[in-house]
Amino acid sequence: MTHYQPIGATKIIYETTGKASQFGTLEELLRLSKEVEGVAPCVDFAHLHARTGANNSYEEFAALLELIEGELGLAVGLEDMHIHISGIDYSSAGERKHLNLADADLRYVELLQALRDFEVGGLIICESPSLEEDALLMQRVYRGLGNH
């Protein structure tokens, strides 16, 4: 197997998916990231929540971050993450569509607290329909959080 050779800091990012019928569980992407040089996961927390309705509490977010750190290490896993956050509409089949945070059940404050407590670094992309408003909301909330 020929491995992708990154140029500088270039990575190929695979995003967690929002339907159980699709490739893209966190575990699948962590395995791919370990097996293929230059590949890293994009952790879409709304998609992870939509797959089963779980992954929506501080404890569950912390467990996901611990899994990432355990599989990829601190430097690769948590210090340079690529993250997507939004609200999400979902059914038993998974993701239907992205929603604004105020219109969804994603516990984004608990998620942001877990990211802060684990000292996660990297990039957060807001995928809400009103992305500017929700991005500013998350920034305000994150800046107001203390360590847990």
Image (cartoon, helix red, strand yellow):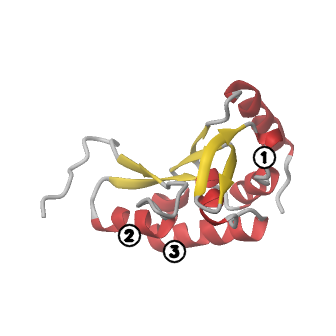
| Left or right side of 79 for 119 | right
Nearer the N terminus, badge 2 or badge 1? Answer: 2
Residue at 69% in and 47% down: 89
Q: Amino acid at mark 3?
A: Gly
Alpha carbons under labels 2 and 1: distance apart = 30 Å
Q: Which mark is residue 31?
A: 2
> Circle 1 sits on which residue?
104
- The outermost residue toward the front is 92
Q: Give the camera-side residue of 7 and 14.
A: 14
Q: CA distance from mark 3 to mark 2?
A: 12 Å
Question: What separation in Å lies between label 3 and label 1 (alpha carbons)?
Answer: 30 Å
Number of dots carrying numbers: 3
Query: What label sits on residue 70 in the rendered view?
Result: 3
Q: Amino acid at mark 2?
A: Arg
Is 123 located above or below residue 136 in the figure? below
Amino acid at circle 1: Ala
- Element carrying mark 2: helix
Q: Which residue is outermost to the left? A: 1
- Residue 26: give x, y in percent of width and height: 50, 64
Give the quadrant of the C terminus.
bottom right
Instruction: State whether residue 140 appears in this view.
Output: yes
Instruction: Write down the quadrant of residue 61 in the picture.
Output: bottom right
Q: Position of residue 84 (x, y in %)?
A: 59, 45
- Tag 1 secondary structure: loop
Seen at 64% across and 40% down, the residue is 98
Residue 60 horizontal/vertical position (percent): 71, 69
Q: Earlier in the sequence, mark 3 or mark 1?
A: 3
Dot in front, 3 or 1: 1
Q: Residue 41 occupies which quadrant of the picture?
A: bottom left
